[in-house]
Image (spheres, grey):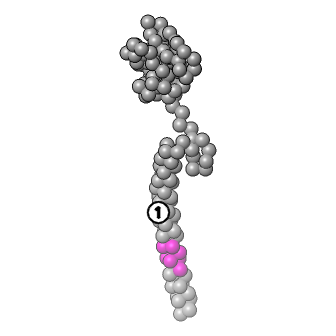
């Protein structure tokens, strides 16, 4: 009789161990799914923080540099040329940047490639004209 009781105990333990392992694997997959969702939320919040402050969460400068494609550069040169042509009394670099809607560096490069450009003044007071 003790061998049957012992075998029943062993069978119950085996069944319980299998069920425990199954529950552990389900719990691990649930936790992994929750962890992935949390990482997604954290990375989205970090991206928003970077955009708003220009720095990463750890204080380093964020890499927000956007490069223009060659077609975008050509379009910017044309847009800058039109902006300068529209200003018959000349226009300053800050006004060109504001009207163009691109970074000052990109606009500066575009201004240097505008055909027929003339300049008057020094540095900050420089005005640009197109013949």
In front of the other: 73 or 99: 99
Residue carrying label 1: 30
The rendered magenta stretch, by its main secondary structure, is classed as helix
Asked whether residue 92 is drawn in magenta, I would say no
In front of the other: 29 or 82: 82
| Residue at the (61%, 50%) spot, across then down | 58
| Residue at the (53%, 37%) spot, across then down | 64
Quarter of the image for the C terminus: give it. top left
Determine if residue 124 is in view: yes
The magenta stretch is 13-20
Q: Residues within 10 Å of mark 1 (few under 14, many from 20)?
A: few
Is 16 situated above or below 37?
A: below
Is 60 situated above or below 23?
A: above
Q: Position of residue 37 (x, y in %)?
A: 46, 55
Is 91 situated above or below 29?
A: above
Q: Position of residue 56 (x, y in %)?
A: 57, 46
Q: Position of residue 42 (x, y in %)?
A: 50, 53
In front of the other: 99 or 122: 122
Using the rendered view, name the quadrant where residue 2 is placed: bottom right
């Amino acid at each position: 009789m003790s061998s049957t009781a012992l075998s029943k105990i062993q069978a119950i333990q085996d069944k319980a161990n299998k069920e425990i392992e199954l529950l552990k694997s389900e719990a691990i997959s649930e936790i992994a799914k929750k962890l992935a969702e949390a990482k997604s939320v954290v990375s989205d919040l970090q991206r928003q923080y970077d955009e708003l402050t220009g720095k990463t969460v750890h204080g380093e400068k964020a890499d927000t540099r956007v490069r223009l494609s060659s077609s975008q550069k050509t379009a910017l040169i044309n847009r800058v040329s039109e902006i300068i042509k529209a200003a018959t009394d000349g226009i300053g670099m800050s006004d060109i940047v504001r009207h163009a809607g691109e970074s000052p560096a990109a606009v500066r490069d575009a201004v240097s490639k505008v055909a027929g450009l003339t300049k008057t003044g020094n540095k900050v007071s420089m005005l640009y004209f197109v013949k």
